[in-house]
Image: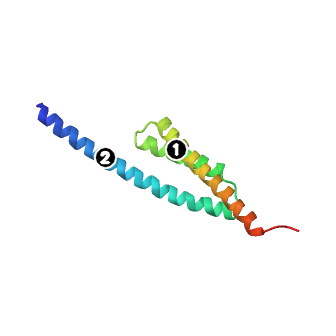
């Protein structure tokens, strides 16, 4: 194979990767938009930031999807652990901010 053909193929593959990366970023942004809404709802109703039943369900579901897609399940679990940890942290921040707003709105007691 000629060097120019190799370069052309590399460029095509890299463009595909760039497109996939852009799609991943947009999907991740949308996922966080949705989970932020959940965090606000939880904060407004004093629900815990962590839903262990939901997390377990997600890990099982995503592990099955990884197997179907012939992906390394450990990789998918690590990736989702990172994402879920970020979501939980954001939910905790919403709870703190919402709690501060409630205290500020309550005014002095007495």
Which residue is more in the foreground, 42 or 95? 95
Which residue is at 45% across, 52% downward?
A: 28
Asked if residue 85 is positioned above or below residue 46 in the image, the reply reads above
Which residue is more in the foreground, 42 or 69? 42
Asked if residue 106 is positioned above or below residue 52 in the image, the reply reads below
The x and y percentages for residue 19 are 31, 50
Which residue is at 36% across, 47% downward?
A: 21
Q: Along the horizontal axis of the image, is 99 left or right of 84?
A: right
- Secondary structure found at label 2: helix
Which residue is at 42% across, 43% downward?
A: 68
- Secondary structure found at label 1: helix
Q: Residue 69 appears in which quarter of the rendering?
A: top left
Q: Which residue is mark 2?
A: 18
Marker disc for residue 80: 1
Q: Nearer the viewer, mark 1 or mark 2?
A: 2
Q: Along the horizontal axis of the image, is 29 left or right of 10?
A: right
The x and y percentages for residue 8 are 16, 40
The x and y percentages for residue 42 are 66, 60
The x and y percentages for residue 93 are 64, 54
Q: Which quadrant: the N terminus?
A: top left
Q: Residue 104 appears in which quarter of the rendering?
A: bottom right
> Mark 1 or mark 2: which comes first in sequence?
2
Which residue is more in the foreground, 56 or 96? 96
Q: Which quadrant: the C terminus?
A: bottom right
| Mark 1 and mark 2: Cα distance apart in space | 21 Å
């Amino acid at each position: 194979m000629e060097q120019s053909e190799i370069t052309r193929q590399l460029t095509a593959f890299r463009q595909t990767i760039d497109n996939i990366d852009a799609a991943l970023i947009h999907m991740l942004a949308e996922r966080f938009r949705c989970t932020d809404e959940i965090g606000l709802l939880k904060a407004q109703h004093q629900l815990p930031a962590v839903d262990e039943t939901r997390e377990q369900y997600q890990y099982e579901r995503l592990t099955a999807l990884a197997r179907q897609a012939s992906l390394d399940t450990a990789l998918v679990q690590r990736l989702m652990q990172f994402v879920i940890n970020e979501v939980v942290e954001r939910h905790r921040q919403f709870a703190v901010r919402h709690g501060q707003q409630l205290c500020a709105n309550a005014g002095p007691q007495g």
